[in-house]
Amino acid sequence: MTASNEPSAPPAKGGPKESPSVPIRLRPARAADVPALVPLLLRLKRLNEEFDPLLKVRDDAEAQAAQVLKAQIADPKAVVLAVEGVGADKDKVVGVVRALVRERPFYAPPQEGVILDIYLLPLYRRRGVGEFVLRETSEALRTKGAGVVTAEFPAQNEIAQRFYAKRGFRPITEIHARPL
Amino acid sequence: MAESTAAPVANGREPRRPARSEKSAAADRRVADRREDETEALGRRAVELAQFYAGKIETVPKVPVRSLHDFALWYTPGIAAVSRAIHADPDRSFELTGRWNTIAIVTDGSRVLGLGDIGPQAALPVMEGKALLFKFLGGVDAVPIPVEAAAPDRLIATVEALAPAFGGVNLEDIASPKCFGILERLAERLPIPVWHDDQLGTAAATVAGVINALALTDRSFSELRTVLLGAGAANLVTARLLVALGHDVHRLTLVDQKGILSAERDDVDELMLRNPWKYRLALATDGGGRTGGLAEAVDGADLLLAASTPVPGTVRPEHVRAMAPRPIVFALANPEPEIWPDVARSAGAAIVATGRSDFPNQVNNSLIFPAVFRGVLDARARSIPDAVVLAAARELARHAADAGLTPEHLLPTMEEADVFPHIAAAVADESVRLGLARSKHSHDEFLALARSRMGRPAALARALARAGLIPPMPPERVRRKRSP
């Protein structure tokens, strides 16, 4: 899949789609976006830290974030999207999406689109942006071969649980942890 | 009165020194020392009296008992018919029992006065004192109920279970931010009014002061730029009430110990989880379009509402000087305001209010809560929405205005006792208007009801004291020591 097949608002195909009530532009991230994406990704990781001490953010997380984003932007099996504001927030990156396609050697369908991170700045929440972003990300993952879409988030994050449950997601795998 | 959650530190601008002379700083210290001595002496005396009286309220009969035979009426078998009547129509519990005039004062002891989380037992004397205030000022029978319930769900379930006995619930001394969720959920579930004084009482008294301060300085809510310093229970509700009165939410700037609260501040996601009420206000105000600290916030502001830390100097003269011409400053921290009134005035403040009775313009929730409960109980109201809180605030403001507004007389004092029945009647009227009243009367009827019901406790106490049934206060055992 080439970058030109990635989603941008408004969506070109699929059924009738509700647009977010706040105007945004969704586009594939470029290497040049990394400096703007890193702080957003770190905000999300710090939010995750609130849910569990085993999600403590590393001291070098900033450098890691830049590296991971750069690598995934170049990776054809990954989806990294930038949410841009319009109007007063034109050209400002107000959200980030990170997802990838993972093999499922034992299960059907054989490829799974995993949403690792969706982060939106607070003023872009609860206005349909998340819904739109999720739909477009799912579509991007589908075009990369995924037959199922999954989302990973901290077990205690009830806001994420509700967000995904409302949109037809159910828990299929649980990850339990204890420190060693 | 004020919140103790925020310790804002101004950043950005260099302070213009010297702000105050050494002499006046020394005077401040003397005032503070003297006040500390007084508080200590009052504390010793309070312990003595608590020991002597062993409690401040008791239940007394309000019906004649001519002989034990009368219990066939007051109790079984006669009383069964009363129970049947209520069973058939539960709202008749407001007519046939004392429910109409009885409220629960509920606390978990998690934020008692300035003492912090001292637990329910230690909160009991404070709740008793509040019950006494309710009785004396409002004619309300209030039952202190400190509960062992650290988790909000447990407190909520407990209060819900107790509700059939009461005509209202006063939540008291519950820590922020859990107090917001507790009030919200109880107000939603219970068929009776629920009030949290630290949120609503303080905010209503503050808003009343603001209404009059605007009148005195020819301002209106729609063009006002306001800074709220401290983002605890009272200020978050004050912000909500200001917006309800027509304040542009984008011209409100909240400042807490981390600076201006904006939608993209680093800790905003944490707030979303820990304090959704503050989070929502962060999004709605978005710093009033500003970032930085108190210095950036006050620049050109008309009104500063400080309810933060009791540290004079939290607000500095240069902050006041940076405000719009004829600025209004409310420094509500107790016992020591964020800036002393004389300092604020010499820095140009046109109007200064504090939480203290020894300065002019005390913003005092005791002017609000007894009357609000008198009003909702007289109307047998089902709830207390913000419109009712605002009706109380407006009436309080009007009462001061009728007596003549000056920069030194912004709000009625506790001595202007006639304000209480008027607030009660305004609250009852608004409850009727909103369709929340089980008992509907005209304004004059509500006013007369409030007057007679508020007058009863003092008459009772006088009669009991005359009969020697309330013993006079014993002489002070521990003499106040004089500081050298």
Image (cartoon, coloured by chain):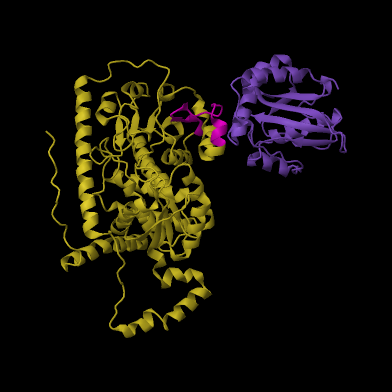
Chain colours: A purple, B yellow
Position of the C terminus of chain B by quadrant: top left
Rendering coords of residue B139 (x, y %): 31, 60
| Residue visible at 38% across and 35% down in the picture | B307
Rendering coords of residue B56 (x, y %): 27, 59
**Do we see residue A91 in this rendering?**
no
| Residue visible at 40% across and 43% down in the picture | B203
**Do we see residue B411 in this rendering?**
yes
Along the horizontal axis of the image, is A88 left or right of B412?
Answer: right
- How many marks the image carries: the answer is 0
- Stretch in magenta: B249-272
Rendering coords of residue B291 (x, y %): 49, 23
| Residue visible at 38% across and 64% down in the picture | B101
Position of the N terminus of chain B by quadrant: top left
Whether B396 is among the magenta residues is: no
Q: Residue furthest bottom?
A: B69
Q: Looking at the rendering, which quadrant does residue B4 occupy?
A: top left
Along the horizontal axis of the image, is B381 left or right of A92?
Answer: left
Rendering coords of residue B149 (x, y %): 47, 52
Along the horizontal axis of the image, is B410 left or right of B77?
Answer: left
